[in-house]
Amino acid sequence: MMNTRFILKIGIIGSLILLFLIPQAIMADLVEEREGWRQKAYDSIEASWPGMQVLAGPILTIPYQVTGTIRETVTDKDGKEREIQRQETLRRNVRLVPTRLDVLGDLQSTLRYRGIFQVPVYTISLKISGDFDLQVLRERVAGWKEGSLHLEAPYLSVAVRDQRGIASPPGLRWKGNEIPFKPGSHLPGSSAGMHARLPDLEMADPGSLAFEFTLELRGMRSMGFSMLADTSSVRLSSNWPHPSFTGEMLPESRDISDAGFTALWKASAFSYNVRDAIEKCEENECGGVLERSVGFELLQPVDIYQQSERSVKYGFLFIVLTFVVLILFELLKKLQIHPVQYTLVGFALLMFYLLLISLSEHILFMPAYAIAALACTGLLTVYFGAILRSRRLGFLLGGGLALLYLVLYVILKAEDYALLMGSLLLFSALAALILTSRNLDWYALMSTAPPASESEKRHEPSLHTGPSDPPIEDLSDRHDF
Protein backbone atom coordinates (compact mmCIF):
# COMPACT_ATOMS: atom_id res chain seq x y z
CA MET A 1 0.00 0.00 0.00
CA MET A 2 1.40 3.41 -1.01
CA ASN A 3 2.30 5.64 1.95
CA THR A 4 0.33 8.72 0.91
CA ARG A 5 1.29 10.66 4.03
CA PHE A 6 4.97 10.32 3.20
CA ILE A 7 4.41 11.34 -0.43
CA LEU A 8 2.30 14.31 0.66
CA LYS A 9 4.95 15.48 3.11
CA ILE A 10 7.69 15.26 0.49
CA GLY A 11 5.49 17.32 -1.83
CA ILE A 12 4.91 19.95 0.87
CA ILE A 13 8.63 20.21 1.65
CA GLY A 14 9.46 20.49 -2.06
CA SER A 15 6.89 23.27 -2.40
CA LEU A 16 8.42 25.06 0.59
CA ILE A 17 11.85 24.89 -1.04
CA LEU A 18 10.46 26.47 -4.21
CA LEU A 19 8.58 29.12 -2.23
CA PHE A 20 11.81 30.10 -0.48
CA LEU A 21 13.07 31.27 -3.86
CA ILE A 22 10.84 34.32 -3.35
CA PRO A 23 12.55 35.65 -0.17
CA GLN A 24 15.91 34.71 -1.69
CA ALA A 25 15.08 36.91 -4.70
CA ILE A 26 14.09 39.67 -2.27
CA MET A 27 17.53 39.40 -0.65
CA ALA A 28 19.17 39.69 -4.07
CA ASP A 29 17.04 42.77 -4.82
CA LEU A 30 18.09 44.24 -1.47
CA VAL A 31 21.76 43.89 -2.41
CA GLU A 32 21.08 45.58 -5.75
CA GLU A 33 19.14 48.36 -4.00
CA ARG A 34 21.99 49.03 -1.57
CA GLU A 35 24.42 49.14 -4.49
CA GLY A 36 22.15 51.76 -6.05
CA TRP A 37 22.30 53.83 -2.88
CA ARG A 38 26.09 53.58 -2.92
CA GLN A 39 26.16 54.80 -6.52
CA LYS A 40 23.97 57.74 -5.49
CA ALA A 41 26.55 58.52 -2.78
CA TYR A 42 29.27 58.46 -5.45
CA ASP A 43 27.23 60.78 -7.66
CA SER A 44 26.57 63.11 -4.73
CA ILE A 45 30.27 63.40 -3.92
CA GLU A 46 31.13 63.79 -7.61
CA ALA A 47 28.71 66.72 -7.80
CA SER A 48 30.90 68.61 -5.32
CA TRP A 49 34.29 67.06 -6.10
CA PRO A 50 36.00 66.40 -9.46
CA GLY A 51 35.16 63.02 -10.94
CA MET A 52 37.25 60.35 -12.65
CA GLN A 53 40.12 62.02 -14.46
CA VAL A 54 42.00 61.47 -17.71
CA LEU A 55 44.92 63.70 -18.73
CA ALA A 56 45.88 64.10 -22.41
CA GLY A 57 48.67 66.20 -23.81
CA PRO A 58 50.34 68.52 -24.18
CA ILE A 59 49.52 69.06 -27.86
CA LEU A 60 51.20 71.91 -29.77
CA THR A 61 48.80 73.58 -32.22
CA ILE A 62 50.25 75.86 -34.93
CA PRO A 63 47.61 77.70 -36.98
CA TYR A 64 48.75 78.85 -40.42
CA GLN A 65 47.44 80.54 -43.55
CA VAL A 66 48.30 79.43 -47.05
CA THR A 67 47.62 81.59 -50.09
CA GLY A 68 47.61 79.79 -53.41
CA THR A 69 46.43 80.02 -56.98
CA ILE A 70 43.43 77.91 -57.91
CA ARG A 71 42.60 77.10 -61.53
CA GLU A 72 39.00 76.42 -62.45
CA THR A 73 37.12 75.73 -65.66
CA VAL A 74 33.92 77.74 -66.10
CA THR A 75 31.27 77.95 -68.82
CA ASP A 76 30.28 81.40 -70.12
CA LYS A 77 26.91 82.52 -71.50
CA ASP A 78 27.75 81.34 -75.01
CA GLY A 79 28.39 77.82 -73.71
CA LYS A 80 32.12 78.03 -74.18
CA GLU A 81 34.45 76.72 -71.49
CA ARG A 82 37.42 78.68 -70.35
CA GLU A 83 39.97 78.45 -67.55
CA ILE A 84 40.28 81.08 -64.87
CA GLN A 85 42.70 81.64 -62.02
CA ARG A 86 41.98 83.06 -58.60
CA GLN A 87 43.79 83.53 -55.33
CA GLU A 88 42.46 81.73 -52.25
CA THR A 89 43.66 81.77 -48.66
CA LEU A 90 43.17 78.63 -46.55
CA ARG A 91 43.40 78.37 -42.76
CA ARG A 92 44.70 75.12 -41.33
CA ASN A 93 46.17 73.77 -38.11
CA VAL A 94 49.21 71.63 -37.58
CA ARG A 95 49.05 69.67 -34.34
CA LEU A 96 52.26 68.22 -32.97
CA VAL A 97 52.77 65.72 -30.17
CA PRO A 98 56.00 65.61 -28.16
CA THR A 99 58.81 63.46 -29.41
CA ARG A 100 59.51 62.75 -25.74
CA LEU A 101 57.07 62.95 -22.83
CA ASP A 102 57.90 62.23 -19.18
CA VAL A 103 55.25 62.31 -16.45
CA LEU A 104 56.17 62.04 -12.79
CA GLY A 105 53.29 61.92 -10.30
CA ASP A 106 52.68 61.59 -6.58
CA LEU A 107 49.09 60.74 -5.60
CA GLN A 108 47.68 61.21 -2.11
CA SER A 109 44.27 59.66 -1.46
CA THR A 110 41.68 60.24 1.24
CA LEU A 111 38.15 59.01 1.93
CA ARG A 112 34.99 61.12 1.66
CA TYR A 113 31.71 59.98 3.22
CA ARG A 114 28.03 60.22 2.35
CA GLY A 115 26.12 58.58 5.17
CA ILE A 116 27.56 55.11 5.68
CA PHE A 117 29.18 55.04 2.22
CA GLN A 118 32.80 56.02 1.60
CA VAL A 119 34.45 57.03 -1.66
CA PRO A 120 38.21 57.36 -2.31
CA VAL A 121 39.26 60.76 -3.68
CA TYR A 122 42.74 61.98 -4.50
CA THR A 123 45.02 64.90 -5.26
CA ILE A 124 47.91 64.14 -7.61
CA SER A 125 50.96 66.37 -8.06
CA LEU A 126 52.36 66.03 -11.59
CA LYS A 127 55.60 67.15 -13.18
CA ILE A 128 55.35 66.96 -16.97
CA SER A 129 58.29 67.58 -19.29
CA GLY A 130 59.39 66.80 -22.84
CA ASP A 131 60.20 68.40 -26.18
CA PHE A 132 58.69 69.03 -29.61
CA ASP A 133 60.47 68.58 -32.95
CA LEU A 134 59.76 71.42 -35.42
CA GLN A 135 61.14 69.30 -38.25
CA VAL A 136 57.65 67.81 -38.53
CA LEU A 137 56.27 71.31 -39.20
CA ARG A 138 58.94 71.98 -41.82
CA GLU A 139 58.08 68.74 -43.60
CA ARG A 140 54.40 69.61 -43.62
CA VAL A 141 54.88 73.01 -45.29
CA ALA A 142 57.87 72.15 -47.48
CA GLY A 143 55.80 72.20 -50.68
CA TRP A 144 54.60 75.79 -50.32
CA LYS A 145 56.37 78.69 -51.95
CA GLU A 146 58.06 81.27 -49.79
CA GLY A 147 55.73 84.14 -49.05
CA SER A 148 52.52 82.09 -49.48
CA LEU A 149 52.72 80.62 -45.94
CA HIS A 150 52.02 82.62 -42.80
CA LEU A 151 52.37 81.04 -39.34
CA GLU A 152 50.05 82.38 -36.66
CA ALA A 153 50.51 82.40 -32.89
CA PRO A 154 50.78 78.79 -31.61
CA TYR A 155 49.34 77.48 -28.38
CA LEU A 156 49.92 74.48 -26.14
CA SER A 157 46.85 72.47 -25.06
CA VAL A 158 46.33 70.06 -22.18
CA ALA A 159 42.99 68.23 -22.00
CA VAL A 160 41.43 66.79 -18.85
CA ARG A 161 38.11 65.05 -18.34
CA ASP A 162 36.92 67.24 -15.46
CA GLN A 163 38.31 70.79 -15.49
CA ARG A 164 37.20 71.38 -11.90
CA GLY A 165 40.10 69.18 -10.84
CA ILE A 166 42.76 71.76 -11.77
CA ALA A 167 43.53 72.98 -8.27
CA SER A 168 45.73 76.01 -9.04
CA PRO A 169 46.77 77.82 -12.25
CA PRO A 170 50.00 76.15 -13.40
CA GLY A 171 52.76 77.87 -15.32
CA LEU A 172 54.53 76.63 -18.45
CA ARG A 173 58.28 76.89 -18.87
CA TRP A 174 58.94 77.50 -22.59
CA LYS A 175 62.15 78.85 -24.15
CA GLY A 176 63.31 80.01 -20.72
CA ASN A 177 60.09 81.97 -20.06
CA GLU A 178 57.19 81.39 -17.67
CA ILE A 179 53.87 81.42 -19.52
CA PRO A 180 50.59 81.09 -17.57
CA PHE A 181 47.96 78.57 -18.59
CA LYS A 182 44.39 79.72 -19.20
CA PRO A 183 41.12 77.77 -18.88
CA GLY A 184 39.96 75.63 -21.78
CA SER A 185 42.02 73.31 -23.96
CA HIS A 186 40.99 74.92 -27.29
CA LEU A 187 40.77 71.40 -28.74
CA PRO A 188 37.56 70.77 -30.70
CA GLY A 189 35.58 67.93 -29.15
CA SER A 190 37.54 68.07 -25.90
CA SER A 191 37.26 71.58 -24.54
CA ALA A 192 37.89 70.85 -20.83
CA GLY A 193 41.44 71.57 -19.77
CA MET A 194 43.87 74.46 -20.20
CA HIS A 195 46.00 76.15 -22.85
CA ALA A 196 48.95 78.53 -23.04
CA ARG A 197 49.53 81.09 -25.81
CA LEU A 198 53.10 80.83 -27.08
CA PRO A 199 55.39 83.29 -28.88
CA ASP A 200 55.40 83.15 -32.66
CA LEU A 201 57.47 80.39 -34.20
CA GLU A 202 60.00 80.92 -36.96
CA MET A 203 61.24 78.38 -39.41
CA ALA A 204 64.74 79.23 -38.24
CA ASP A 205 63.94 78.14 -34.65
CA PRO A 206 65.93 75.20 -33.31
CA GLY A 207 64.55 71.81 -34.26
CA SER A 208 63.80 70.78 -30.65
CA LEU A 209 61.79 72.93 -28.25
CA ALA A 210 61.69 71.81 -24.60
CA PHE A 211 58.79 72.39 -22.21
CA GLU A 212 58.07 71.72 -18.55
CA PHE A 213 55.20 72.43 -16.16
CA THR A 214 53.73 71.20 -12.90
CA LEU A 215 50.07 70.47 -12.30
CA GLU A 216 48.02 69.64 -9.23
CA LEU A 217 44.95 67.66 -10.25
CA ARG A 218 42.05 66.40 -8.14
CA GLY A 219 39.73 63.52 -8.88
CA MET A 220 38.02 60.45 -7.51
CA ARG A 221 38.21 56.67 -7.94
CA SER A 222 40.38 56.52 -11.08
CA MET A 223 43.09 58.34 -13.05
CA GLY A 224 44.23 57.86 -16.65
CA PHE A 225 46.98 59.23 -18.90
CA SER A 226 46.77 59.46 -22.66
CA MET A 227 50.24 58.58 -23.99
CA LEU A 228 50.37 61.14 -26.81
CA ALA A 229 54.07 61.18 -27.74
CA ASP A 230 56.58 59.37 -29.90
CA THR A 231 58.09 57.97 -26.72
CA SER A 232 56.43 58.45 -23.34
CA SER A 233 56.80 57.30 -19.77
CA VAL A 234 54.56 57.72 -16.73
CA ARG A 235 55.97 57.04 -13.27
CA LEU A 236 53.54 57.22 -10.33
CA SER A 237 53.61 56.66 -6.58
CA SER A 238 50.61 56.62 -4.24
CA ASN A 239 49.63 55.92 -0.65
CA TRP A 240 46.60 53.81 -1.74
CA PRO A 241 47.36 50.10 -1.18
CA HIS A 242 44.63 48.61 -3.41
CA PRO A 243 45.09 49.72 -7.04
CA SER A 244 43.60 48.09 -10.11
CA PHE A 245 45.56 48.92 -13.25
CA THR A 246 43.39 49.72 -16.25
CA GLY A 247 43.60 51.03 -19.80
CA GLU A 248 45.36 50.06 -23.00
CA MET A 249 48.50 48.68 -21.34
CA LEU A 250 49.53 47.33 -17.98
CA PRO A 251 52.48 49.00 -16.26
CA GLU A 252 55.93 47.79 -17.22
CA SER A 253 56.82 47.51 -13.54
CA ARG A 254 54.85 47.90 -10.34
CA ASP A 255 55.26 47.46 -6.61
CA ILE A 256 52.25 47.15 -4.27
CA SER A 257 52.46 47.10 -0.48
CA ASP A 258 50.41 48.11 2.55
CA ALA A 259 52.03 51.56 2.33
CA GLY A 260 50.86 52.17 -1.25
CA PHE A 261 52.07 51.43 -4.76
CA THR A 262 54.45 52.58 -7.46
CA ALA A 263 54.04 51.93 -11.19
CA LEU A 264 55.85 52.71 -14.43
CA TRP A 265 54.33 52.77 -17.93
CA LYS A 266 56.32 53.13 -21.15
CA ALA A 267 54.88 53.49 -24.65
CA SER A 268 55.84 54.51 -28.17
CA ALA A 269 53.99 55.87 -31.18
CA PHE A 270 53.86 52.33 -32.59
CA SER A 271 52.22 50.74 -29.56
CA TYR A 272 49.76 53.58 -29.01
CA ASN A 273 48.89 54.62 -32.62
CA VAL A 274 49.49 58.29 -31.83
CA ARG A 275 49.43 59.51 -35.43
CA ASP A 276 45.89 58.28 -36.00
CA ALA A 277 44.63 60.22 -32.97
CA ILE A 278 46.42 63.41 -34.09
CA GLU A 279 45.17 63.16 -37.68
CA LYS A 280 41.60 62.98 -36.40
CA CYS A 281 42.33 65.92 -34.11
CA GLU A 282 43.53 67.98 -37.10
CA GLU A 283 40.14 67.24 -38.65
CA ASN A 284 38.56 68.87 -35.57
CA GLU A 285 37.74 65.54 -33.89
CA CYS A 286 39.86 65.66 -30.76
CA GLY A 287 37.45 63.85 -28.45
CA GLY A 288 39.29 60.57 -29.00
CA VAL A 289 42.45 61.76 -27.27
CA LEU A 290 40.82 61.05 -23.90
CA GLU A 291 39.41 57.66 -24.83
CA ARG A 292 42.62 55.63 -25.03
CA SER A 293 44.67 55.84 -21.88
CA VAL A 294 46.60 53.93 -19.24
CA GLY A 295 46.02 54.33 -15.55
CA PHE A 296 44.57 52.84 -12.40
CA GLU A 297 41.47 52.64 -10.25
CA LEU A 298 41.39 53.04 -6.48
CA LEU A 299 39.58 49.88 -5.44
CA GLN A 300 37.89 49.35 -2.11
CA PRO A 301 39.62 46.47 -0.27
CA VAL A 302 36.42 44.39 -0.25
CA ASP A 303 33.31 45.06 -2.31
CA ILE A 304 30.74 44.03 0.28
CA TYR A 305 27.84 44.06 -2.17
CA GLN A 306 29.61 41.88 -4.69
CA GLN A 307 30.49 39.41 -1.93
CA SER A 308 26.95 39.52 -0.54
CA GLU A 309 25.45 39.00 -3.98
CA ARG A 310 27.61 35.92 -4.54
CA SER A 311 26.74 34.51 -1.11
CA VAL A 312 22.98 34.97 -1.67
CA LYS A 313 23.24 32.76 -4.76
CA TYR A 314 24.16 29.87 -2.46
CA GLY A 315 21.09 30.40 -0.25
CA PHE A 316 18.95 27.94 -2.21
CA LEU A 317 21.66 25.27 -1.92
CA PHE A 318 21.85 25.76 1.86
CA ILE A 319 18.09 25.33 2.22
CA VAL A 320 18.00 22.21 0.04
CA LEU A 321 20.91 20.56 1.87
CA THR A 322 19.46 21.34 5.31
CA PHE A 323 15.99 20.06 4.40
CA VAL A 324 17.42 16.86 2.88
CA VAL A 325 19.39 16.20 6.08
CA LEU A 326 16.25 16.72 8.19
CA ILE A 327 14.29 14.31 5.98
CA LEU A 328 17.02 11.69 6.40
CA PHE A 329 16.89 12.15 10.16
CA GLU A 330 13.13 11.60 10.02
CA LEU A 331 13.62 8.34 8.14
CA LEU A 332 16.63 6.99 10.00
CA LYS A 333 15.60 8.02 13.53
CA LYS A 334 11.86 7.40 13.03
CA LEU A 335 11.06 11.03 13.92
CA GLN A 336 8.39 13.39 12.70
CA ILE A 337 9.16 17.05 11.88
CA HIS A 338 6.23 19.30 11.03
CA PRO A 339 6.28 21.41 7.82
CA VAL A 340 5.97 24.51 10.00
CA GLN A 341 9.28 23.57 11.60
CA TYR A 342 10.85 23.23 8.15
CA THR A 343 9.53 26.71 7.36
CA LEU A 344 11.10 28.21 10.47
CA VAL A 345 14.43 26.59 9.65
CA GLY A 346 14.29 28.03 6.11
CA PHE A 347 13.62 31.55 7.36
CA ALA A 348 16.49 31.25 9.87
CA LEU A 349 18.83 30.27 7.02
CA LEU A 350 17.73 33.29 4.98
CA MET A 351 18.13 35.61 7.97
CA PHE A 352 21.88 35.01 7.68
CA TYR A 353 22.03 37.04 4.46
CA LEU A 354 20.05 39.94 5.89
CA LEU A 355 22.40 40.09 8.88
CA LEU A 356 25.42 39.85 6.59
CA ILE A 357 24.32 42.73 4.35
CA SER A 358 23.38 45.06 7.20
CA LEU A 359 26.43 44.32 9.36
CA SER A 360 28.96 44.58 6.52
CA GLU A 361 27.87 48.17 5.86
CA HIS A 362 29.17 49.15 9.30
CA ILE A 363 32.04 46.76 10.05
CA LEU A 364 34.52 44.77 7.98
CA PHE A 365 33.14 41.95 5.87
CA MET A 366 34.94 39.12 7.68
CA PRO A 367 33.66 39.90 11.21
CA ALA A 368 30.21 40.66 9.75
CA TYR A 369 30.19 37.25 8.10
CA ALA A 370 31.38 35.55 11.30
CA ILE A 371 28.74 37.25 13.47
CA ALA A 372 25.90 36.43 11.06
CA ALA A 373 27.04 32.81 10.70
CA LEU A 374 27.46 32.30 14.46
CA ALA A 375 24.08 33.87 15.22
CA CYS A 376 22.17 31.69 12.75
CA THR A 377 24.17 28.55 13.54
CA GLY A 378 23.64 29.00 17.29
CA LEU A 379 19.91 29.57 16.87
CA LEU A 380 19.46 26.54 14.62
CA THR A 381 21.64 24.32 16.84
CA VAL A 382 19.27 24.92 19.76
CA TYR A 383 16.24 24.42 17.52
CA PHE A 384 17.60 21.23 15.94
CA GLY A 385 18.22 19.79 19.39
CA ALA A 386 14.59 20.48 20.32
CA ILE A 387 12.86 19.11 17.21
CA LEU A 388 15.18 16.08 16.99
CA ARG A 389 14.85 15.43 20.75
CA SER A 390 18.62 15.11 21.07
CA ARG A 391 21.22 17.68 21.99
CA ARG A 392 23.87 15.53 20.36
CA LEU A 393 22.03 15.55 17.05
CA GLY A 394 21.43 19.29 17.41
CA PHE A 395 25.15 19.95 17.83
CA LEU A 396 25.90 17.56 14.96
CA LEU A 397 23.63 19.45 12.55
CA GLY A 398 24.80 22.82 13.88
CA GLY A 399 28.42 21.82 13.36
CA GLY A 400 27.66 20.72 9.81
CA LEU A 401 25.95 24.03 9.09
CA ALA A 402 28.92 25.95 10.53
CA LEU A 403 31.20 23.93 8.26
CA LEU A 404 29.04 24.90 5.26
CA TYR A 405 29.33 28.60 6.16
CA LEU A 406 33.11 28.21 6.48
CA VAL A 407 33.32 26.57 3.05
CA LEU A 408 31.15 29.33 1.57
CA TYR A 409 33.46 32.01 2.99
CA VAL A 410 36.48 30.29 1.44
CA ILE A 411 34.64 30.16 -1.90
CA LEU A 412 33.83 33.88 -1.71
CA LYS A 413 37.48 34.72 -1.07
CA ALA A 414 38.96 32.39 -3.67
CA GLU A 415 37.50 34.05 -6.77
CA ASP A 416 39.82 32.24 -9.19
CA TYR A 417 38.84 28.84 -7.76
CA ALA A 418 35.19 29.59 -6.91
CA LEU A 419 33.76 27.30 -9.60
CA LEU A 420 36.08 24.43 -8.67
CA MET A 421 35.34 24.72 -4.96
CA GLY A 422 31.60 25.07 -5.55
CA SER A 423 31.66 21.93 -7.70
CA LEU A 424 33.56 20.04 -4.99
CA LEU A 425 31.02 21.21 -2.40
CA LEU A 426 28.11 19.90 -4.47
CA PHE A 427 29.89 16.62 -5.13
CA SER A 428 30.66 16.18 -1.42
CA ALA A 429 27.03 16.87 -0.49
CA LEU A 430 25.79 14.39 -3.09
CA ALA A 431 28.32 11.76 -1.97
CA ALA A 432 27.29 12.18 1.68
CA LEU A 433 23.62 11.81 0.71
CA ILE A 434 24.28 8.67 -1.34
CA LEU A 435 26.43 7.00 1.31
CA THR A 436 24.05 7.86 4.15
CA SER A 437 20.98 6.52 2.35
CA ARG A 438 22.60 3.49 0.73
CA ASN A 439 20.98 1.02 3.19
CA LEU A 440 17.50 2.54 3.15
CA ASP A 441 14.69 0.33 1.84
CA TRP A 442 12.83 2.93 -0.20
CA TYR A 443 10.10 0.46 -1.23
CA ALA A 444 9.38 -0.24 2.41
CA LEU A 445 9.32 3.48 3.18
CA MET A 446 6.89 4.12 0.35
CA SER A 447 4.53 1.31 1.38
CA THR A 448 4.62 1.42 5.18
CA ALA A 449 3.33 4.27 7.30
CA PRO A 450 5.85 5.79 9.71
CA PRO A 451 5.29 5.03 13.39
CA ALA A 452 2.94 7.33 15.22
CA SER A 453 4.35 9.76 17.73
CA GLU A 454 3.65 9.40 21.44
CA SER A 455 1.11 12.23 21.34
CA GLU A 456 -0.76 10.52 18.52
CA LYS A 457 -0.80 7.26 20.47
CA ARG A 458 -2.22 8.99 23.55
CA HIS A 459 -5.02 10.61 21.57
CA GLU A 460 -5.82 7.60 19.35
CA PRO A 461 -9.56 6.81 19.75
CA SER A 462 -10.49 3.37 21.15
CA LEU A 463 -12.76 1.02 19.25
CA HIS A 464 -14.15 -0.54 22.48
CA THR A 465 -16.59 1.02 24.95
CA GLY A 466 -16.75 -1.81 27.43
CA PRO A 467 -14.28 -3.94 29.25
CA SER A 468 -11.51 -5.45 27.25
CA ASP A 469 -12.56 -8.43 25.21
CA PRO A 470 -10.95 -11.71 26.10
CA PRO A 471 -8.41 -13.01 23.69
CA ILE A 472 -9.82 -15.00 20.85
CA GLU A 473 -9.20 -18.64 21.37
CA ASP A 474 -7.57 -20.53 18.54
CA LEU A 475 -10.04 -23.26 17.63
CA SER A 476 -8.11 -24.65 14.75
CA ASP A 477 -7.06 -27.75 16.74
CA ARG A 478 -10.44 -28.46 18.39
CA HIS A 479 -12.86 -31.11 17.15
CA ASP A 480 -16.56 -31.21 17.83
CA PHE A 481 -18.16 -34.57 18.11
Image (cartoon, helix red, strand yellow):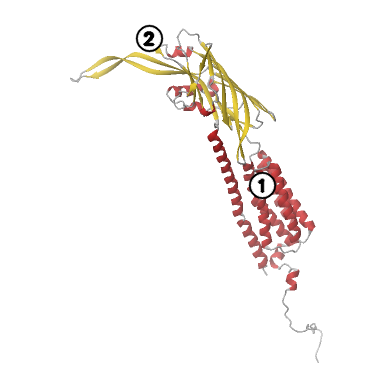
Q: Which residue is mark 2?
A: 145
Mark nearer the viewer, 2 or 1: 1
Is 340 placed left or right of 294 in the picture? right
Q: Residue at x 57, y 43 (%)?
A: 37
Q: Is residue 287 in view?
A: yes
Q: Please, what secondary structure does the residue beneath circle 1 have?
A: helix
Q: Residue 87 appears in which quarter of the rendering?
A: top left
Q: Is residue 434 in view?
A: no
Q: Identity of the amino acid at label 2?
A: Lys
Q: Please, what secondary structure does the residue beneath circle 2 have?
A: loop
Instruction: Give residue 68's position: percent from left, percent from top.
Output: 34, 13
Is 478 placed left or right of 234 in the picture? right
Q: Nearer the viewer, residue 81 or 206?
A: 206
Instruction: Say which quadrant the N terminus sits in.
Output: bottom right
Instruction: Give residue 363's position: percent from left, percent from top.
Output: 68, 42
Instruction: Give residue 181's position: percent from left, percent from top.
Output: 50, 20
Q: Residue at x 69, y 44 (%)?
A: 368
Q: Residue at x 78, y 84 (%)?
A: 467
Is 17 placed left or right of 196 in the picture? right
Q: Nearer the viewer, residue 357 or 467?
A: 357
State the CA–CA distance, disc 2 to disc 1. Answer: 77 Å
Q: Which residue is mark 1?
A: 356
Q: Nearer the viewer, residue 17 or 39?
A: 39
Q: Identity of the amino acid at label 1?
A: Leu
